[in-house]
Image (spheres, grey):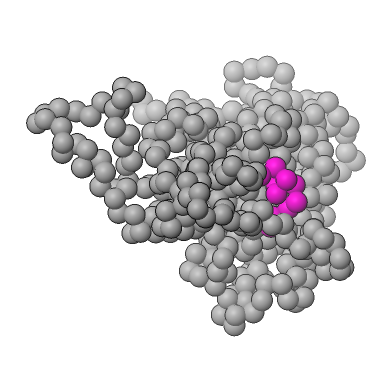
């Protein structure tokens, strides 16, 4: 997390590069066009500002609009929530592959929870049919009236997403509120300590700050950006490294967006669950009321775990509960999934999906293999970082495959140091890519400012 300010500064520099990148370079190894000669305004050309704005809007759609954060603490202010969201946004730009693994683990956990609730409480999928059967023939159930019967539809994946993102909070008379995991909620319902939450999927969608229209607009932005790059490739027009890197983020953002499609977005308040069994004392300690030992900082290994815990959380290997999350009565901002069994099939699927997404990202960066760089050193670095991005997941696949198959503890010192080393190499690789992108904007190849001639794709009679 300490690298977030540095990376954010590098990203912001991309937005201001048109003001500082007009210095000529004394390199003549490849034919280039200096941006000082870039066109100012024409219907058949584009400017550097146009390129940056297009990529910035697309990256915003990928990192801000596509991310579905967990429910914040009820007493947290807008500023705290904003900067937490901004930190996740920067993480999405540094390592978009981890957003895919995070979304995959949440999606698989939601599927498993939805199936579990249907089996243990089949009435929740039949109560709509029972109430409707009591109505006269041809009559429709009007749930808008205050006196209308409250109907619980089938427990859906949306309900499970809502539960895992901290959507159900337990209230007792003599204790502070506490967020429940789906397993805890299910156990209390079975024991008769709480009622089954009466909330339909439409109500959860109403709590979400995103609807089908806003999601469609974000997808159209991503699709339009991709279509432009495909058209430029067909017409043999060069693209910038910034556009290639943005395309890689777009490809992975589409995967995350699809996995989070049913997850409510930007919900600010959990649903209250009341403790009704007065003859039984409420639980003393719940899952999200105990912080992890890493934050005690007793041994040197705790400092190491504290540094790599965002990586571990986004990879879906373990949810790390901080003292701040316990104090604010919320779930971890990078949690929201089931990590009780690191050897189950969900973790294996997430591991392979993460490796596949890293391969996609590295493969897209390889589109710049023959880019006209200022010198041979920059070209070599870009090729090396592209291959490193595509293959960085292979050591993680071997490490966690070893952990899963041989039932090795994830907290062993070999796993800790291996993950920390790979994380350091990957972050250094991403920072190198950002620096190369900034340097490449100082002098772009000839033809970069030409726009796509869309009329050539229209058949003429």
Q: Nearer the viewer, residue 373 or 112?
A: 112
Q: Quadrant of the C terminus?
A: top left
Q: Horizontal and vertical percent for residue 347?
A: 54, 66
Residue 77 location, quadrant: top right
Point 88% across, 32% down: residue: 23
Q: Residue at the bottom extreme?
A: 406
Above/below status of 292 relative to 148: below
Picture mark count? 0
The range drawn in magenta is: 320-329
Q: Horizontal and vertical percent for residue 83?
A: 74, 36
Q: Residue at the front extreme?
A: 279
Point 29% across, 27% down: residue: 148
Residue 323 is a magenta residue = yes
Above/below status of 194 relative to 76: below
Above/below status of 352 relative to 54: below
Point 55% across, 50% down: residue: 180
Q: Nearer the viewer, residue 243 or 140?
A: 140
Q: Nearer the viewer, residue 204 or 54?
A: 204
Q: Horizontal and vertical percent for residue 95?
A: 68, 51
Q: Nearer the viewer, residue 135 or 432?
A: 135
Residue 2 is a magenta residue = no
Point 68% across, 60% down: residue: 312
Task: Report if residue 433 is visible in the image.
Answer: no
Is 92 on the left-hand or right-hand side of 435?
A: left
Is 261 on the left-hand or right-hand side of 144?
A: right
Q: Horizontal and vertical percent for residue 142?
A: 26, 26
Residue 447 location, quadrant: top right
Task: Report if residue 132 is visible in the image.
Answer: yes
Is 440 on the left-hand or right-hand side of 389?
A: right
């Amino acid at each position: 997390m300490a690298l977030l300010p540095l990376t954010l500064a590098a990203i912001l520099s991309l937005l201001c590069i048109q003001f500082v990148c007009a210095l000529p370079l004394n390199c003549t190894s490849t034919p280039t066009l200096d941006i000082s000669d870039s066109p100012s305004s024409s219907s058949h050309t584009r400017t550097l500002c146009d390129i940056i704005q297009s990529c910035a809007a697309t990256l915003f759609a990928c990192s801000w609009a596509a991310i579905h954060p967990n429910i914040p603490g009820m007493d947290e202010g807008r500023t705290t929530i904003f900067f937490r969201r901004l930190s996740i946004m920067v993480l999405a730009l540094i390592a978009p592959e981890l957003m895919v693994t995070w979304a995959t683990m949440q999606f698989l956990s939601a599927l498993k929870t939805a199936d579990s609730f249907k089996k243990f409480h089949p009435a929740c999928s039949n109560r709509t049919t029972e109430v409707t059967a009591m109505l006269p023939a041809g009559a429709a159930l009007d749930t808008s009236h205050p006196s209308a019967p409250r109907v619980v539809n089938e427990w859906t994946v949306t309900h499970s997403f809502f539960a895992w993102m901290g959507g159900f909070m337990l209230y007792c008379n003599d204790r502070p509120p506490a967020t429940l995991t789906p397993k805890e909620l299910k156990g209390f319902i079975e024991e008769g300590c709480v009622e089954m939450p009466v909330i339909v999927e439409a109500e959860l969608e109403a709590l979400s700050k995103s609807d089908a229209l806003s999601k469609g607009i974000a997808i159209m932005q991503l699709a339009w950006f991709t279509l432009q790059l495909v058209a430029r490739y067909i017409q043999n027009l060069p693209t910038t490294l910034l556009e290639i890197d943005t395309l890689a983020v777009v490809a992975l953002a589409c995967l995350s967006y699809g996995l989070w499609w049913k997850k409510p977005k930007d919900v600010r308040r959990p649903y209250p669950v009341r403790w009704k069994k007065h003859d039984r004392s409420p639980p003393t300690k719940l899952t999200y009321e105990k912080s992890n030992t890493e934050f005690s900082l007793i041994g040197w290994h705790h400092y190491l775990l504290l540094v790599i815990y965002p990586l571990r959380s986004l990879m879906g290997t373990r949810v790390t509960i901080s003292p701040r999350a316990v104090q604010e009565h919320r779930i971890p901002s990078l949690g929201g999934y089931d990590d009780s069994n690191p050897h189950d099939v969900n973790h294996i699927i997430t591991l392979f999906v993460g490796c596949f997404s890293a391969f996609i990202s590295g493969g897209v960066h390889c589109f710049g293999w023959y880019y006209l760089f200022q010198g041979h050193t920059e070209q070599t670095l870009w090729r090396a970082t592209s291959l490193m991005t595509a293959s960085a997941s292979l050591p993680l696949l071997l490490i966690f495959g070893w952990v899963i198959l041989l039932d090795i503890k994830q907290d062993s010192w070999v796993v800790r140091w291996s993950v920390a080393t790979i994380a350091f190499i990957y972050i250094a690789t991403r920072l190198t890519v950002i620096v190369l992108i900034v340097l490449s904007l100082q002098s772009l190849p000839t033809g970069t400012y030409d726009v796509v001639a869309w009329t050539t794709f229209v058949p003429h009679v």
